Image (tube, rainbow, N blue to C red):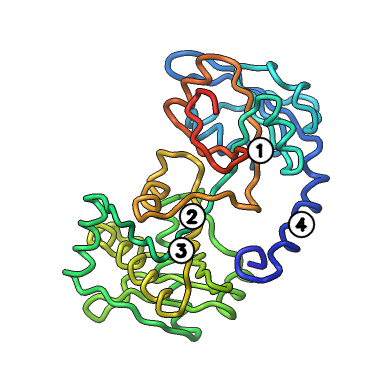
Amino acid sequence: MPTYASRWSPLSVAAHRVLALPLQVRGPMRRRVVESGGREITVLEIGRAKATEPLCAGLFGELPSPEYGASRSLRDPAAAAGAAHLVVAEVHRWLATRFRRAGWVVVPGHVRWTGDLEQLPPPGMSRSLKDDLRKVRSRGFTLEQAGGDAAWEEFTTRMLVPHASARFGDDAWLPSSYLLGRFRALGQLHFVVREGMRVAGFCSLRSGETLWVPLSGVRDGDGTLLRAGVSAAAYAHAFEWARRQGCTRVDMGRTSPFVTDGVLQYKRKWGLTAVSDPLAHLTAVWVGSDAARLAFARQPVLAEGVHGLWVYAGGGP
């Protein structure tokens, strides 16, 4: 929260990087043999599993059990380059440039999505977005603000948790009780209402001229409500409410770096732009075979470059 919704953001980011450095100068090694496109690929992971496994799983699906090896340095790109068809190493942000210059691809664990409210929805809307907005208008979705224990309990238990579980299963991220308490104390709770029933909700926090939406959910994780346009109603009303409050920008949270991610594609459809998240874990990726490059061609990712994010699909920058 101090990073995304306070004037202390630079200090918060600096503190996070100082604390993370001891954990990211050396890490355990894991080696796996996976199948991709009918070919076997040897994958070497260096660093904490929570930093390297999401990328590998996104590329290859369910991962086989690894063979463990001695820990390795996470400071020297030359030490691991070429050690397997694909090397995925956890890397600290202060060292990422060193790996990038050595030919590695730096992939964040997640990216954030922001936008200028004057351009949301975008002028050249897709047919899909036009259809979403038509549903919002024709089905009478409205927005209300609420507060208090009962409202937050309804949002948390009937919307936030079931929606996250329905969409992401065991990988769903849910805020701790402490963080949820901070959101309750500092944020504004909104409900999307249809025919007198609260069908979705989201929490917003303002930082300067930016409105951040860190939490959202659909009642009971109901897919019927999603198809009826409730998510589009939440986005459209959030943007309009932010404009009325005098905001000029929005931060609509994060997604995985995989270009084929449905949530990523939905945010992009609205005209939001992917930006680097200062708190995201980074992995440096050495692609050492055609088979590994083809894996990225099938599952492209957003990578961090000198001038911002770019799409890596197995070729060059």
Relative vertical location of residue 240 with respect to residue 281 in this rendering, above or below? below
Q: Mark 4 or mark 2: which comes first in sequence? A: 4
Relative placement, left or right, of 7 versus 206 is right
Spatial CA distance of label 1 from label 3 is 25 Å
Q: Nearer the viewer, mark 4 or mark 1?
A: 4
Circle 2 SS class: strand
Q: Position of residue 175 (x, y in %)?
A: 57, 64
Q: Mark 1 or mark 2: which comes first in sequence? A: 1
Spatial CA distance of label 4 from label 1 is 24 Å
Crowding near pointer 1: few (<14 within 10 Å), some, many (20+)? some
Which residue is labeled 4 in the image? 14
Which residue is labeled 3 in the image? 161
Across the whole image, how many numbered discs are drawn on residues?
A: 4
Q: Mark 4 or mark 3: which comes first in sequence? A: 4
Relative vertical location of residue 208 with respect to residue 223 in this rendering, above or below? below
Relative to the observer, which residue lies in front, 27 or 13?
A: 13
Contact? badges 3 and 2 (CB < 8 Å): no
Q: For residue 138, what is the image quadrant?
A: bottom left
Which residue is labeled 1 in the image? 49
Relative vertical location of residue 157 with respect to residue 146 in this rendering, above or below? above
